[in-house]
Amino acid sequence: AQSVTQLDSQVPVFEEAPVELRCNYSSSVSVYLFWYVQYPNQGLQLLLKYLSGSTLVKGINGFEAEFNKSQTSFHLRKPSVHISDTAEYFCAVSPNAGNMLTFGGGTRLMVKP
Amino acid sequence: DAGVTQSPTHLIKTRGQHVTLRCSPISGHKSVSWYQQVLGQGPQFIFQYYEKEERGRGNFPDRFSARQFPNYSSELNVNALLLGDSALYLCASRIKDNTEAFFGQGTRLTVV
């Protein structure tokens, strides 16, 4: 069984400030890790994914995440946020490369001017 | 190219009724998955189909069923609707197993 915990339900931040959205997971098997973004009234868009290799993963829109196996974490970061980054962000795990995703509860990023 | 398309976009049903939601995958994609997203929560996996065969099922009651057609489109059926079935239902497609999933914009189901 797998589970994902997103430690912050809401993260308010000022525009151009850095941000970190936290994600911890548990699994009895090796997993693949994902971050998705959901804008209001829309579906999910893949930001980035960790399948293997380098633990620092770069994604779209300037986001990056670091896989830490010992801490079972996959935190999402951006050095400077924009108003347009305001959205809901979901961390997810999968026992394979994208099937049967298990999602966390989401973190609402609120970027203020 | 068109992305994953879902219909209808919004739907209101009464308790006890039946509903059918439809999904057309991206052209060339053979795998379709369904997820339920209750307001304020993350999506939960319901079903996965690949080449018209069920490949995975989440922890949902038998009231939920799905199928995939020869053109790889899919339907999700829910019988005997409950108020708790109110949610955004998301469809995702992928070229084949173990590749990136692309999500549609979802169908918002409200059960009254």
Image (spheres, coloured by chain):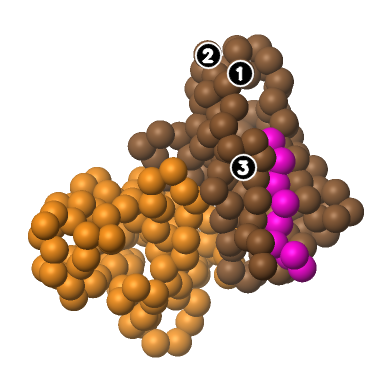
Chain colours: A orange, B brown
The answer to whether residue B13 is above or below residue B28 is: above
- Helix or strand or loop: what does disc 1 sit on? strand
Q: Earlier in the sequence, mark 3 or mark 2?
A: 3
* Circle on res. B46: 3
Task: Give the crowd class for mark 1: few <14, some 14-19, many >=20 residues within 10 Å.
Answer: some
The subunit carrying tag 2 is B
Tell me the CA gap for discs 1 and 3: 20 Å
Front one among A111 and B56: A111
Q: Position of residue A67 (x, y in %)?
A: 34, 75
- The residue depicted at 45 percent of the width and 34 percent of the height is B38
Left or right of B28, for residue A81: left
Q: Which residue is disc 2 drawn over?
A: B112
The amino acid pointed to by label 1 is Lys
Q: Secondary structure at mark 3?
A: strand
The answer to whether the residues at label 1 and label 2 have Cβ atoms under 8 Å apart is yes
Secondary structure under tag 2 reads: loop
